[in-house]
Amino acid sequence: MSKNGMDRDHPAIEAHGLVKLYGKNRALDGIDLTVRRGQVLGFLGPNGAGKTTMIRILATLTRPDGGTARVLGHDVMSEADAIRARMAVTGQVASLDEDLTGHENLTILGRLHGLSRAGSRQRADALLAAFDLTGSAGRPVGGYSGGMRRRLDIGASLIVTPDLLFLDEPTTGLDPRSRGHVWELVRQIAAAGTTVLLTTQYLEEADQLAEQIAVIDHGRIVAEGTSAQLKAQVGSGALHVRLLDGEQRTQAQQVLAGALEGTVHLAADPLALSMLLATPAGATDVGRLVGHAMTRLAEARVGVAEFTLGQPSLDEAFLALTGHAAGPATTDQEDVNA
Ligand code: ATP
């Protein structure tokens, strides 16, 4: 079926009460999710939250134990073939043949998708050029870097432009430059009209790419909205404090927790603390609150190098929504509740 089909009126994804059990573990514990056509949805959650399981069900690679899901208007249980014909999945591990060159990998996939010999070569050339891989097209994939493989893997999923693309943690393990490169590709894919469901552990990635974000934790959606809405849900502002002396951080944490209502968050930087300001007040009130906190720090003789007041980051929003930090950085962060 093509993009002109009757099913254009359906959302790209519509899931109700999805449950997936692995023994006693409820990997998905009643997920409701709607994704509009043409939208980029960021599915954000820490390790083990259930992101991959959700993708596997929607991509018809595994069956749910409860609930229903329709993808591109088709039921995941009874109409899997119709869904598979119009979507593509890229996983955390590239599904490429290491011994073949980048060009050969794409050409073979093109042939498997029914393109002619010349058509598949042309498509491979175009994708390799778009993904900045022309110079390495003739080299075996076994010698590619992580970033190159990831780009080729995404390219492979676009041999035939899908209506829906599942990108499972497309930048995990990539350096910042390669990550930026993949982000640009995702933007291009979305601009061309493909609906994208992107799972990520990186808050910044969801912030950068996704119009809508669903936060998943322990198999449940704990928050949903635009990045701005999620931040707003969490509080009116965030206070960031940098100390002169890291030895005083615990003391500063206690003073701030006593002076302001909220959770004091210790960042990976040993001199830094941050805190969400729960008061949905105007700037004057927030200013007064912060002034009060700074006075208390001065009274306690805690040396402050700088402090800033701004919007909460998505990272701080996640912490406030789930009670723990997002992603693999959990171990170097501690929180104290006021
Ligand atoms: P990550 O970011 O680490 O990939 P995730 O959010 O994608 O995590 P899932 O891979 O969906 O999380 O896993 C959700 C839960 O289900 C975890 O507790 C995981 O251990 C469990 N799980 C996933 N796949 C299986 C499986 N095939 N057999 C048993 N348990 C599984």
Image (spheres, rainbow, N blue to C red):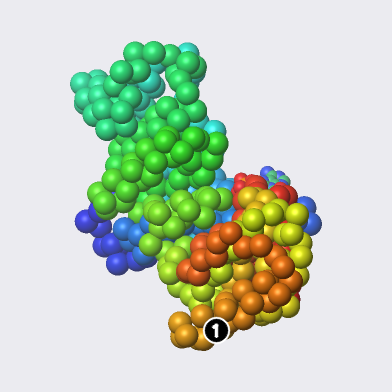
Secondary structure of the residue carrying numbered label 1: helix
Confirm if mark 1 falls within 8 A of ligand 1: no
- Type of amino acid under label 1: Arg
Q: Is residue 151 visible?
A: yes
Quadrant in the picture for residue 322:
bottom right
Q: Residues within 10 Å of mark 1 (few under 14, many from 20)?
A: few
The one nearer the camera, 256 or 232, is: 256
Quadrant in the picture for residue 216:
bottom right
> Is 245 located above or below residue 292 in the figure?
above
Q: Position of residue 30 (x, y in %)?
A: 62, 67
Which residue position is annotated with label 1?
288
The one nearer the camera, 29 or 189, is: 189
Please state if 111 lies on the left or on the right of 31 as rendered.
left
The quadrant the C terminus occupies is bottom right
Q: Position of residue 82 (x, y in %)?
A: 39, 50
> Is 288 located above or below residue 113 in the figure?
below
Quadrant in the picture for residue 73:
bottom left
Residue at the (43%, 69%) spot, across then down: 228
Residue at the (64%, 56%) spot, across then down: 244
Residue at the (67%, 72%) spot, across then down: 298
Q: Position of residue 253 (x, y in %)?
A: 72, 66
Q: Position of residue 21 (x, y in %)?
A: 70, 56
Could you tell me how many numbered marks the image carries? 1
